[in-house]
Amino acid sequence: MSCGRSRRLNKPEEASWPILRLIEWTTSYLADKGAESPRLDAEVLLASVRQCSRIELYTAFNEVADEATRGAYKSLVQRRAAGEPVAYLVGFREFYSRDFKVTPAVLIPRPETEFVVIAALDFVSDRGLSGSLRMADIGTGSGNVGITLAKENPSWNVVAIDIQPDALEIARQNVAHHAVDEQMELRCGPYYAQESETVLFDIVVSNPPYVTSNEYDDLPATVRDYEPKIALVGGDRGTEVIEQLIEESTPRVRPEGALVVEISPMLEADVTALIEQHALWQLHKVYKDHAGHSRVIVAIRA
């Protein structure tokens, strides 16, 4: 069975625009518009219109699209050329080999954030933890980190918290999609929201806003003009939210529990200092991302 159809970008002869040529033309067009990954963008958008996987496109290179499909594809390509992120155009982003629904209400999951999951899993393994564990995902956004952890072990329970109701609704839909309703609790509010102070967590994970106010103006337009500012900017220094997170987590994490936080590589020294200066936290490990940049810090509750 073939997967859907394609478009020919206003060319006179439909038969002269099979899928392969269409992808190649779009790749060149998006490259001229400054897209960082034009071929990938062209394929993802076309696969979305045809409701198939990218791999299936490769088995349909000689097929030609109908007019409706061409029109839908053209619309997406034009929006991408104007800077709109592919993830928002197709409505999902892959994270840790799973698809998560995204809208402009939530930050688009990045590959670097997978190191938050890796760090949390390493902590569990290194400490020999087993059985039911209680975790919190602060600033959950789409829920990608908390849901991924819940999927890793059915005995783990995760409280996912976000200050934005619209973001929490997307997280709720992703919780249902990944069938972790029984493991996840969603809370709306800052930091630990209405969570009882008597409940201690084994692990707290967070991808907090850490872009400085000045850096925000220099972000690529495809980020600055589309993704939620509240999920990006961490204050004038970039560490304000992280500093508050450390303080709020102190009475909420059990002794020997962990706080796993994504950071900007440029803030490593500042965040490390915040932890080392705190009497109840000890720096455990710093993870580097695939580019070799410091990306995740793990602290242990004393």
Image: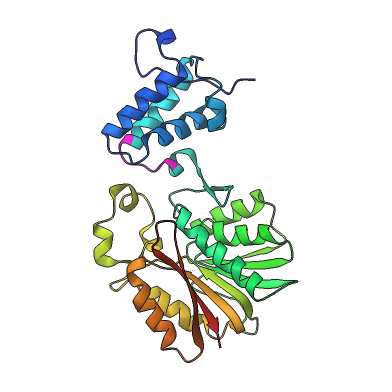
Identity of the residue drawn at 60% across and 56% down: 172
Q: Can you give x and y, in whole percent of width and height, for residue 66 in the image?
A: 49, 15
Left or right: residue 235 versus residue 261 is left
Residue extending furthest bottom?
A: 279
Residue 129 sits above or below residue 93 on the image: below
Q: Is residue 50 magenta?
A: no
Q: Position of residue 204 (x, y in %)?
A: 56, 73
Residue 194 position, x and y percent, is: 58, 75
Q: Considering only vertical position in the picture, is 70 above or below 111?
A: above
Q: Quadrant of residue 197?
A: bottom right
Question: Looking at the figure, which quarter contains the N terminus?
Answer: top right
Give the mark count. 0
Residue stretch in magenta: 81-86
Closer to the camera in the image, 275 or 89: 275
Taking the image as shown, residue 122 lies to the left or right of residue 299, namely right
Q: Is residue 187 visible?
A: no
- Residue shown at 32%/41% (left/top)? 83
Query: What colouring style does the render use?
Result: rainbow
- Magenta stretch secondary structure, dominant: loop
The residue shown at (47%, 80%) is 246
Q: Is residue 144 left or right of residue 153?
A: left
Is residue 290 visible to the viewer in this orientation of the structure? yes
Specify the quadrant that holds the C terminus: bottom right
User: 292 or 83: which is nearer to us?
Assistant: 292
Percent across and percent down for residue 117 are 56, 62
What residue do we see at 42% from left, 40% from top? 86
In the image, residue 129 sits, relative to residue 164, either above or below, namely below
Tell me if 12 is positioned left or right of 299 in this view: left
